[in-house]
Amino acid sequence: MEKLRMGLIGCGGMMKSHVRAVPMLQDIDIVAVCDVVRERAEEVATVLNDPVVMTDYHEMVDLVDCVLVALPHDLHYECGMFFAKKGKHVLMEKPLCNSEEECVSLIETCDKMGVVLMCGYPLRFWPELVRLKEELDSGKYGRVMQVSVWTEQLTGADWLERETPDWASSARLGGGQFFSHGCHYVDLLLWFLGEPVKGMHFGTRVGTPWVMREGTSIAGFVFENGALGYHGATWGARGTRLGWDLQIHTEKGMLEYENHSGEARLYNGKIEHIPGEIENAYDYRVLWRRDEKSNKQTQFEIAHFAECIRTGKKPITDGRAALQSLRIIWKMYDAEKAGVIADLRGLGLPRD
Ligand SMILES: NC(=O)c1ccc[n+]([C@@H]2O[C@H](COP(=O)([O-])OP(=O)(O)OC[C@H]3O[C@@H](n4cnc5c(N)ncnc54)[C@H](O)[C@@H]3O)[C@@H](O)[C@H]2O)c1
């Protein structure tokens, strides 16, 4: 089998995670790397098999079959369109693009050109989360009533010293914490709970003055199946207990995926509110544990992208799926401004 020739564009923080995954992918050859800051591209190149290093991504077009784009959000559209129009497959970091118009135009162009467009939502492909979803779908825990996700990070308190202090401007990011990072978790809630009906979002800049919009975000959702979803996140965590945590309450117990330890746990020592017995509720059983300590594990999403290119399969996180999550976020931002509950029905595009 011929290896897929891939180009890497934008060699900042996220690309350094991606290149850690590359040695695990036998059927992909990274032939070119690009960053406007040449030293960043060179640094990424040192762990690869001698790719061409460049500062202008247009120059890689004849060298590659596909690209992995990890640029600032406001550059996703222009870059994605350039490669799609040249017939190259595009794996775009999240969020797909900064506006509805850009997303639709990129999706339509990729369709027209017959190239794969996939958005990088790695959680969808993590084996430990895929397994959790399969367990839930098997019905052995009964119905799900609530899925909660917490993410607590300190992102950019050093903003004044940064080379690109505008990284968190609205024009660059396209939104605040909820849009920029929360899109992972809106996507995850849709995966676990299906179609949403309504939702509310609240954001604040308190404690994160480096972000032009909200740096801390709370969102609640109601789904068609009656379950509730919750997303609580901050970019201003000076300390954390939960870090990155997923909790799923079901009729037969609470399942947790605790990212720091990599443990999937089951808590089912029912809370009866009997004094002296309540501690049973905190006992848990480890169902399984991931082999490796926390990293972004993007080898699974990249492998899925490659498989879709080879087989013509539609990516699980294709442009349409990515757009639905973003539409939900935009609708919730608008509703927050208007002081109303967002109607989240019918925001998905047909998938076929
Ligand atoms: N999936 C995840 O878990 C995850 C985590 C972090 C970031 N991301 C996403 O990855 C993308 C990049 O984020 P980051 O944190 O790596 O940002 P970053 O600022 O660290 O890296 C962006 C890089 O792009 C380069 N760049 C800017 N303009 C360019 C151009 N025209 N041509 C070539 N290079 C250019 C910059 O020099 C920089 O090195 C964003 O979409 C972000 O949301 C995803």
Image: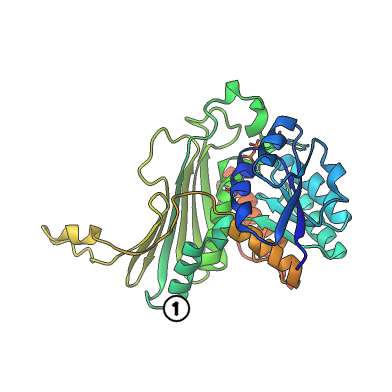
Q: How many marks?
A: 1
Direction from residue 134 to residue 255 in the image, left or right: left
Name the residue: 57% across, 53% down.
Answer: 184
Viewer-proximal residue among 69 and 73: 69
Give the left or right position of residue 82, taking residue 91 as reference: right
**Which residue is pictured at 59% across the width and 60% down the height?**
300
Where residue 170 appears, x then y in whole percent?
A: 67, 35
Front residue of 198/307: it is: 307
Is the N terminus in the top left, top right, bottom left or bottom right quadrant? bottom right
Name the residue type under label 1: Ser
Residue 44: horizontal and vertical position, in percent?
A: 67, 40
Which of the two residues, 127 or 107, is positioned nearer the viewer here? Answer: 127
Tell me what residue is drawn at x 76 percent, y 60 percent: 4
Is residue 1 shown above or below 53? below
Q: Is residue 107 left or right of residue 244?
A: right
**Horizontal and vertical percent position of residue 198:** 55, 60
Q: Secondary structure at mark 1?
A: loop
Quadrant location, the C terminus: bottom right
The crowding category of the residue bearing disc 1, from other C-alpha atoms within 10 Å (few below 14, some 14 to 19, many at least 20), is few
- Tell me the residue at 59%/40% (across/down): 176
Residue 199, placed above or below residue 213: below
Task: Kindly give the residue lying farthest to the top in the view shown.
Answer: 161
Residue 242 in view here:
yes
Pointer 1: what residue?
138
User: Along the horizontal axis of the image, is 186 left or right of 144?
Assistant: right
Rendered location of residue 179, percent (x, y): 61, 46
Q: Is residue 229 above or below residue 176?
A: below
Say whether residue 317 is visible. Answer: no
Ligand 1 picture quarter: top right
Colouring scheme applied when the structure was drawn = rainbow
